[in-house]
Amino acid sequence: MQLVEDHIRTLIAADIPIWDVDPYATEVLQTPEPYYTELREKGAFVYIPRYALLACGRYDETREVFSDWERFVSSRGVGLADFHVAKPWRAPSIVLEVDPPYHTRTRTVISRALSPRAVNDLKDAFAAKADALITELLDLGEFDAVDDLAEAFPVSVFPAAVGMREISKRMLVDYGAMAFNALGPENERRSKWLEKASEIVPWIMEQCKRESLSPGGFGATIYAAADADELTEEEAGMLVRSLLSAGIDTTVTGIGNTIWCLGRNPEQFEKLKRDPKLARPAFEEALRYTSPVHSFCRTASVDTTVGGVPISRDTKILCVLGAANLDERKWLNADRFDIERRPTGHLAFGVGIHGCVGQIVARAEAEAILTAIAQKVYSIDIIGEPVWRPNHAIHALDSMRVRFNRR
Amino acid sequence: MTSVTFRSHDGSTVQVNGELGVSLMQTALSNGIDGIVGECGGSAMCATCHVYVDEAFVNLLPPMNDVENEMLECTVSTRRASSRLSCQIRLSRELEGLVVELPETQA
């Protein structure tokens, strides 16, 4: 058994195309669209020698692998490392990187905390914060859409909804970025981010303790499950930390990417201004179009086939969600951003039992901020070239100067 | 094909023909039924495809799993005994003539 990047080297069938590409190269992470296109064109699955794994980027096959938790497990890690043969950098997530029946127990508790009703109760607070922030940004005129808007808004509402009392924007955003970079290969970027763990992790641990959280938040609901013996105290703490690793950097990215889409497509922004009820569909389309989570892995637990392609047990498969969400086989005019598309079935939140458990909160945040923008902003000017921030699982902006013109 | 009737909160009804094996949520979306959103794409994870199933059909549906049950516990519109997530209902011959009521709001 030979290991590459801490997983078992995949043996390939003769007819699977081989492609010597590095999906984790900085330029690919910053501008992934040509890589997405070539990946889909080469075949349903391609073999990538430098990481000894299969990658898929066509919609049907990606969806099949990503949603079938029995044949393609998450418990062996959603990054390159296979937890059957390698030690994870930290204790694996007890919801993202586990399988049923254990997964059902943890997932049930988080989905209760983040339920439609719990989120509905927060809508007015989200709308008020969004309104205030957009007013402030209109006064500024020109600002950084990442720092001042995409990061500022979720950080102003989500940690408070969790029940956190001490809020550090940098720590919270970087915690997610670190966890997502850890999913990639052992390169310089990964080491650089893991070095931050010694500063970030103890702070997060402290903030997520039962006694640090205020009553009535998502965190308190999770600790209540420990009181009811549904979870141990330790598991409750881990799930509260999962809310923060998965719930900040992702929504930050989703909102930033949506502003990027609207800024580049003024005619779509006009539609949104005419009908602010398009805020939610506009966010969905921006998720499809930019895929904030660009790829996650699965590991084959059995010998199987997908779309006629044989896949052997122990194979790591890189599911390139960003490519599947732009697949012309599935989406008509896939490369066009259209807020009236209603792209139900996009893979940006995943699909099946591991689909994003926080998607209801994410949509509520996006709806609040995009509605405020639609009501108050006349036009969005992007100033200069936006810069993308390379990350092994997240496709996010690093900075984007923007001017909001008053309505 | 299976005929399905959607009755909206204001009492108006729309009848459509759905393909066998396709989910009720998908059927609603492909027929432009307002009141079914289906944001999560059918994973029982957003509860925006909540329906009240007509009494005559409740017992003909597949049993509810834990995930759907938990989701229905906290929908925005009140849960009733007949509440289901329409993404978890696949159209079959037995469901010919299915009638569902749409809740006041989904999100």
Image (tube, coloured by chain):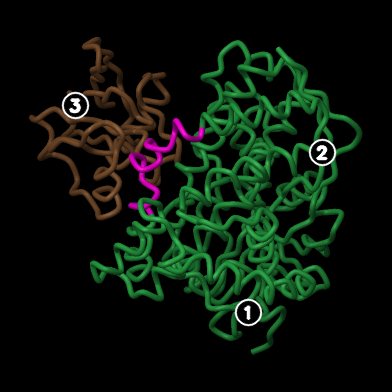
Assign a secondary structure to mark 1.
Answer: loop
Output the chain of dot 1. A
Please provide percent x and percent y for residue A352: 43, 52
Query: Mark 2 vs mark 1: which is more N-terminal?
Result: 1
Mark 3 to mark 1 CA distance (whole Å): 52 Å
Badge 1 is on which residue? A89
- Disc 2 versus disc 3: nearer the observer: 2
**Residue A145 part of the magenta-drawn span:** no
Q: Which chain is brown?
A: B
Is residue B24 shown above or below B104? below
Residue A328 in the image: x percent, y percent?
66, 35
Of A293 and A401, the residue lying toward us: A401
Residue type pointed to by label 2: Met
Quarter that holds the C terminus of chain A: top right
Q: Residue at x 44, y 69 (%)?
A: A237
Q: Are marks 2 and 1 on the same chain?
A: yes
Identified by mark 3, the residue type is Leu
Q: Quadrant of residue A198?
A: bottom right
Residue range (magenta): A111-126
